Image (spheres, rainbow, N blue to C red):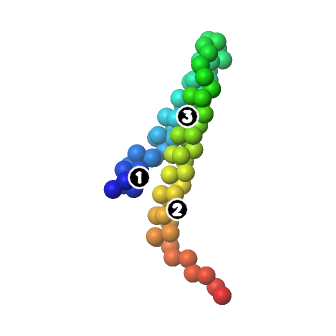
Amino acid sequence: MVFRFIEHIARYELFIVVGLAMTIGTAIKLFWNIDFSSDWFWLLAGIGLTVEGAISWIKQRKFDKKYKIIERE
């Protein structure tokens, strides 16, 4: 059940949203000189990496189910 939830939520759209949030936050900090903690940046970076890992993991599982790997001895 949790895997199906991740499969529906953790798509490229979520990764794009996290990337946009990081870009917009950095631009606000640079251009308008608004000071906020860098911990927010690293939180978003961690979420982005988690989403990217989940996407890769899901795609790899689908590939492994579709193609059986035969090893030579």
The residue wearing badge 3 is: 44
Residue at horizontal 57 percent and vertical 44 percent from the top:
49
Position of residue 68 measured from the top left corner of the image (x, y, whole percent): 51, 76
Position of residue 43 measured from the top left corner of the image (x, y, whole percent): 56, 34
Disc with the residue nearer the chain's start (1 vs 2):
1
What kind of residue is marked 2? Answer: Gln
- Looking at the image, which is closer to me, 3 or 15? 3
Marks 2 and 3 close (CB-CB < 8 Å):
no
What kind of residue is marked 1? Answer: Glu
Residue 18, numbered circle: none
Decide: few, some or many residues near mark 2? Use Cα within 10 Å; few <14, some 14-19, many ≥20.
Answer: few
| Front of the two marks 2 and 3 | 3
Side of 46 relative to 7 (left or right):
right
Marks 1 and 3 close (CB-CB < 8 Å):
no
Q: Is residue 34 above or below residue 72?
A: above
Decide: few, some or many residues near mark 1? Use Cα within 10 Å; few <14, some 14-19, many ≥20.
Answer: some
Residue at horizontal 41 percent and vertical 50 percent from the top:
6
Disc with the residue nearer the chain's start (1 vs 3):
1
Residue 7, numbered circle: 1
The residue wearing badge 2 is: 60
| Front of the two marks 1 and 3 | 3
Q: Quadrant of residue 4?
A: bottom left
Residue at horizontal 39 percent and vertical 56 percent from the top:
3
Residue lying at the far left of the rendered structure = 1
Decide: few, some or many residues near mark 3? Use Cα within 10 Å; few <14, some 14-19, many ≥20.
Answer: some
Side of 42 relative to 8 (left or right):
right
What kind of residue is marked 3? Answer: Leu
Side of 44 relative to 10 (left or right):
right
